[in-house]
Amino acid sequence: MRGLLALEDGQTFEGVGFGVEGVETGEVVFNTSMTGYQEILTDPSYYKQIVTMTVAHVGNTGINPEDVESERVWVSGFVVRSLSPIVSSWRERGTLDEYLKAQGVIGLSEVATRTLVRHIRDRGVMRAAIAHGEAAEDPAALVELARSSMDMSGANLVDAVTTAESYIWTERSDPQWYRSPHDEAVGPLIVAYDFGIKRNILRMMTDRGLRVTVVPAQTPASAVRAMNPAGVFLSNGPGDPAAVTYAIDHVQQLIGNVPIFGICLGHQILGLALGGKTEKMRFGHRGGNQPVKNLLTGVVEISSHNHGFAVSEGSDLGGAEVTHVNLNDHTIEGLRDTAKGVFSVQYHPEASPGPHDSLYLFDEFVRTVHNQTPVVSE
């Protein structure tokens, strides 16, 4: 059945629909990962986004219950060049088409994704409408729908993805994928702010013996301090970090009182809490192959990314130093203030999907909460 992607600038891309029939809006973005589509679909940071995969063939390994990063699919739509007609994996428990149908998500295949991605790179990410079925027959109406949809700038999307209640996380990594140095999590207590947290981040902490309590994004700093944690973690998440004003306020109150580690949106919120500014990027970084240079060691890490905003270069960070930069466009990828016991990275050291070059950052967090001198490499 016919499918259509319509952009706010009037450009349209035809395709073949899969998943559910219907129409949805979101910001159209692209991801350059070669695999890991299930982790991408279930990453809450993609809330209100239509994700385009640059890899040609998607769906060949099917779906399994182990690779999800949250309890549901968060993307507004999923665009691929070719949906594999064959599923072949010893772990598969269903097809991508079946999965999107069950999750109520629109998919679009047979799209000229190379042309679409070049268009986004030239024009920047933009609002879009994706349709499968009858709604795809009216391109003009879909363009107008895209133009009237939500703008990501100024959007607080954290409230829609955060947990409603606190919970204790105990799950560890499957030992066939990661070797955990600890038998169980009996170490210091970490409070993790859920701005849209990925499960593999939590596993990376329990793997290292940390006890983890996850709290809603709106949790006041006073409530966190009352839990007497050894450290605070600031998670990834969707939307404009500057719009999550309550989180910035809470983190400002915690800085200097407890070690803090932030990833992705958590990095941006920490940057804002330190006095910096953030800005929307032209088309962002999304993929598992981004080169980041550690300025403290000179080592280049190949890393996993998913962000459309960045800490502004040259903004006042209250004495914090820049520790990592992206080698493609030199955007800020890491910060630290040793005196205050805080550090953060814009990218995803937990991968899922992606390489494991940056796992040492979780070891650095462990050393920090144990009141040892932080290290910058393994």
Image (spheres, rainbow, N blue to C red):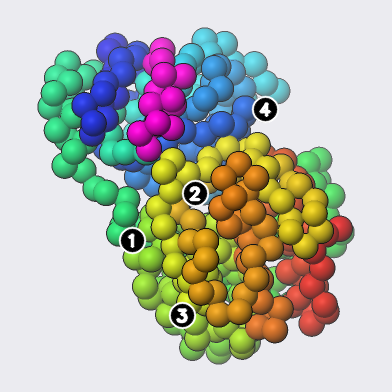
Label 3, label 2: how many angstroms apart (C-alpha)? Answer: 22 Å
**For mark 3, what is the residue?**
250
Q: Residue at x 56, y 31 (%)?
A: 32
Q: Residues within 10 Å of mark 3 (few under 14, many from 20)?
A: some
Foreground mark, 4 or 1, reads 1
Location of mark 1 (residue): 156
Residue 272, given in percent of the width and then of the height, sits at 47, 71
The Cα atoms of the two marked residues, 4 and 1, are separated by 36 Å
Mark 3 lies on a secondary structure that is helix
Q: Earlier in the sequence, mark 3 or mark 4?
A: 4
Element under disc 1: loop
Q: CA distance from mark 4 to mark 2?
A: 29 Å
Mark 2: amino acid: His
**CB within 8 Å, label 4 to label 1:** no
Which image quarter holds the C terminus? bottom right
Secondary structure mostly taken by the magenta-highlighted segment of the chain: helix
Name the residue type under label 3: His
Residue 181 lies, with reference to residue 91, above or below; the image says below
- Element assignment for label 2: strand
Q: Which residues are magenta?
A: 110-124
Percent position of residue 338, x then y: 71, 78
Kind of residue at badge 4? Arg
Magenta stretch holds residue 120: yes
